[in-house]
Image (cartoon, rainbow, N blue to C red):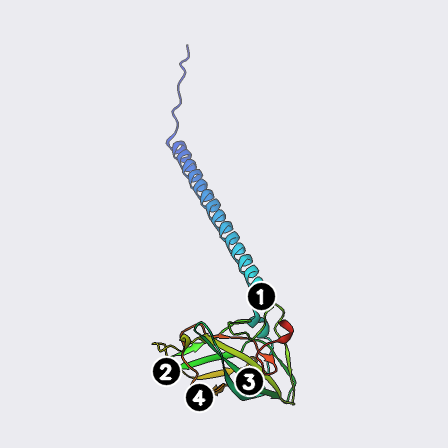
């Protein structure tokens, strides 16, 4: 009777099998890492796209409503601006204001539109910058959402105006600083005007612009000497 011998696996076969198993595990780990990196990359790209779309939508919506941004494309760099006068406006409930009138001309035809840049120089050695509003407490400006006036400027001077309004403390002595002067730059122009006096009805010309207790506002530039756009009232 012939004996059947059982063949034992060779050592080299075992080593080869273990090497294949290790290699398969390494490849599997690499695949999982690649899948993870791909998922993270796709998520990051999606987030960037969402943020970009959101910012673009916000910017588009804001640009349609922001008067200052709409007027920034208009410019009158060669405009000649002359300050005609600053008149005090009667206030109430602690509010006061100034009606500012100016004469503007330009050798090159151009267009002005928007809010003047106004800075109030205070006795506290600081500057208060005015915020543009369509209309304020003491009238002036515009009462509708119609586009801001586009004012044609040519060689013949024309009178333009706007108002500056604030909380002045109602004339009651307070710790609020006084306004020494106001600096004015019309929209689209390069020159800066400085006003240090104002005219007050029944008082005459006075130096300084009263007290500043907050809420400095400026209305849009309009034609004429009233500071308001009559077609919008």
Residue 206 position, x and y percent, is: 44, 88
Which of the two discs, 3 and 4, labels the residue nearer the N terminus? 3
SS label for mark 3: strand
Mark 4, secondary structure of its residue: strand
Calculate the distance from the C-alpha at mark 3 to the C-alpha at mark 2: 24 Å
Mark 1 or 3: the one toward you: 3
Closer mark to the observer between disc 4 and disc 1: 4
**Front tag of 1 and 2:** 2
Q: Which mark is residue 101?
A: 3
Viewer-proximal residue among 199 and 102 = 199
**Location of residue 48 in the rendering, given as x and y in whole percent from the top left corner:** 51, 56
Tags 3 and 4 touching, CB below 8 Å: no
Circle 3 residues within 10 Å: few <14, some 14–19, many ≥20: many
Q: On the rendered image, what quadrant is the N terminus found in?
A: top left
Query: In terms of sequence position, does the residue under pointer 1 or pointer 3 come before the other?
Result: 1
In percent of width and height, residue 135 lies at: 55, 71
- The quarter holding residue 169 reads bottom left
Q: Which residue in the rendered view is the most extreme toward the front? A: 202
Specify the label residue 65 is tagged with.
1
Q: Which numbered disc flags the more N-terminal residue, 4 or 1? A: 1
Mark 1 residue element: helix
Q: CA distance from mark 1 to mark 2?
A: 36 Å
Say whether marks 1 and 2 touch (CB < 8 Å).
no
Q: Residue at x 63, y 69 (%)?
A: 146
From mark 3 to mark 4, how far is it between C-alphas? 17 Å
Depth order, front residue of 16/185: 185
On screen, residue 155 versus residue 203, left or right, reads: right
Q: Is residue 125 above or below residue 233?
A: below
Give the total number of marks visible in the rendering: 4
């Amino acid at each position: 009777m012939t004996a059947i011998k059982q063949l034992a696996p060779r050592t080299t076969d075992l080593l080869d099998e273990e090497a294949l198993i290790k290699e398969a595990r390494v490849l599997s780990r690499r695949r999982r890492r690649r899948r993870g990196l791909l998922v993270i990359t796709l998520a990051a790209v999606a987030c960037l796209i969402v943020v970009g779309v959101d910012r673009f939508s916000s910017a588009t919506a804001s640009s349609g409503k922001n008067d200052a941004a709409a007027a920034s494309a208009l410019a009158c760099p060669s405009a000649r601006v002359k300050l005609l006068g600053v008149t005090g406006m009667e206030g109430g409930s602690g509010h006061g204001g100034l009606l500012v009138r100016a004469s503007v001309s330009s050798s090159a035809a151009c267009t002005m539109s928007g809010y003047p840049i106004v800075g109030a120089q205070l006795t506290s050695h600081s500057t208060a910058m005015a915020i543009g509003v369509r209309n304020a407490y003491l009238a002036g400006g515009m009462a509708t959402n119609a586009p801001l006036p586009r004012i044609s400027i040519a060689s013949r001077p024309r009178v333009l105006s706007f108002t500056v309004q604030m909380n002045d403390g109602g004339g009651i002595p307070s710790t609020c600083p006084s306004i020494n002067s106001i600096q004015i730059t019309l929209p689209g122009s390069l020159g800066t005007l400085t006003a240090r006096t104002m005219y007050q009805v029944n008082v005459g010309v006075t130096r300084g612009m009263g007290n500043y207790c907050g809420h400095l506002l400026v209305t849009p530039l309009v034609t004429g000497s009233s500071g308001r756009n009559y077609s919008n009232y």
